[in-house]
Amino acid sequence: MRIVVTGGAGFIGSCFVRTVLAGEHPGLAGAEVVVLDAFTYAGRIENLDPVRDDPRLRVERGDVRDPRRVAEVVGDGGVDLVVHFAAETHVDRSITGAADFVTTNVVGTQVLLQAALDGGVGRFVHVSTDEVYGSIDSGSWPEEHPLEPNSPYSAAKAGSDLLARSYHRTHGLDVVVTRCSNNYGPHQFPEKVIPLFVTRLLDGGRVPLYGDGRNVRDWLHVTDHCRGVALAATKGRAGEVYNIGGGTELTNRELTTRLLAAVGAGEDRVEHVPDRKGHDRRYSVDWSKIRDELGYTPQVAFDEGLAGTVAWYREHRDWWEGLR
Ligand SMILES: NC(=O)c1ccc[n+]([C@@H]2O[C@H](COP(=O)([O-])OP(=O)(O)OC[C@H]3O[C@@H](n4cnc5c(N)ncnc54)[C@H](O)[C@@H]3O)[C@@H](O)[C@H]2O)c1
């Protein structure tokens, strides 16, 4: 089996590549993996260090917006599965400049879908996000909920999510879409809240808490997310959407308190800053479908996962020190 993993040098994509090559996903064991990545600021070859010498890994530098390059990697007739992680991913960056979000997330996804269709790819897994649903005060979104994205990031992800659906409905391409909650774990670029706060705290600095700190997120360990994606890839039904949740909802304030405790820092290290523009109040996915149909349950307890993540950043200063 040959799998093309777009964005395979990023935070989640590289975890997926490492765990596939380590044989952690039944149904994908023994697969060859081709990483297609443009190596933007978020793509780091070091993320693949543990598997660099594996003969089943090939790394191809390429932009998903480039149809010729994408056809070379995806369209040679020998690809069984595409798992599409590549995207511009940071909401704050999408607020200051949305153009790359539209071209990479929307156009890049369409280029990939077309190449997959033309090249006879067996299955296409599109990795979407819970942010496409918008914001919810109480309860949780089922997969049928309308998409009401609020940031340029989530709007571009919603565009790509719907294009994936359209290639299934219109052309019969075997597409599965996953929509997950907030990931955390090692190798996450230190612009996202957990690695940003951890690295600042480890450096003796202060952490910027947005607004009243009451925005709620559901936290999902990256290895649990990759397990969910692998289940969707191997057992999911064509044309279906699967939410993937982590089961730990926290306000940003609660998250900050846990991070301060994890590094032994006090409240004086928190700096209250004006809220993010259009800041979604709460995300919450109903992930009973993937649990009941595919047998997914998150396995990493949040406190244990957070402790492991903090330890990883403490031990891998060389990975993040030059990035801030
Ligand atoms: N991190 C989260 O909490 C989260 C939550 C829900 C969904 N997602 C989705 O999961 C996917 C992966 O997220 P992540 O956090 O690993 O992102 P990331 O920013 O860490 O990595 C993105 C990767 O995509 C690559 N890339 C960007 N533009 C590209 C282009 N034009 N062509 C080829 N490669 C390109 C980058 O080089 C990088 O390797 C994204 O689609 C994101 O929307 C992430």
Image: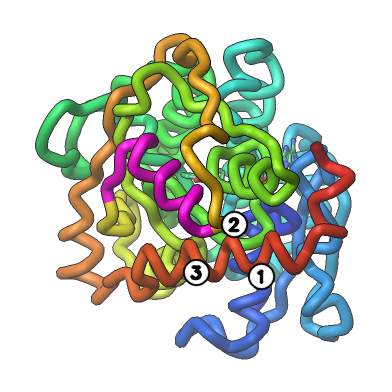
Left/right of residue 265 with respect to residue 277 in the rendered view: right
Q: Is ligand 1 closer than 8 angstroms to the Cβ of mark 2?
A: yes
Q: Distance between the residues labelled 3 and 2?
A: 8 Å
Q: Which amino acid does label 3 sit on?
A: Thr
Q: Position of residue 304 (x, y in %)?
A: 42, 71
Q: Position of residue 164 (x, y in %)?
A: 45, 40
Based on the displayed image, in which of its 4 quarters is residue 155 positioned?
Answer: top left
Q: What element carries label 2?
A: helix
Provide residue 27's location: percent of width, then percent of height: 47, 84
Residue 281 versus residue 99 in the image, above or below:
below
Q: Earlier in the sequence, mark 1 or mark 3?
A: 1
Residue 147: x and y in percent read 29, 26
Instruction: Report the residue at 25% width, 63% height from top.
Output: 290
Q: What residue type is labelled 2?
A: Ile
Position of residue 64 in the picture relative to residue 297 (left or right): right
- Left-right relation of 156 to 322: left
Residue for badge 1: 17
**Magenta-highlighted residues:** 249-262
Q: Distance between the residues labelled 1 and 3?
A: 11 Å
Q: Quadrant of residue 31?
A: bottom right
Give the crowd class for mark 1: few <14, some 14-19, many >=20 residues within 10 Å: many
Mark 3: which secondary structure?
A: helix
- Residue occupied by mark 2: 12
Ligand 1 - quadrant of the structure image: top right
| Nearest to the observer: residue 251 or residue 183 | 251
User: At x 74% / y 68%, what residue is drawn?
Assistant: 315
As for residue 306 lying within the magenta part, the answer is: no
* Location of the C terminus (image quadrant): top right
Q: Do the residues labelled 3 and 2 touch (CB within 8 Å)?
A: no
Residue highlighted by disc 3: 223
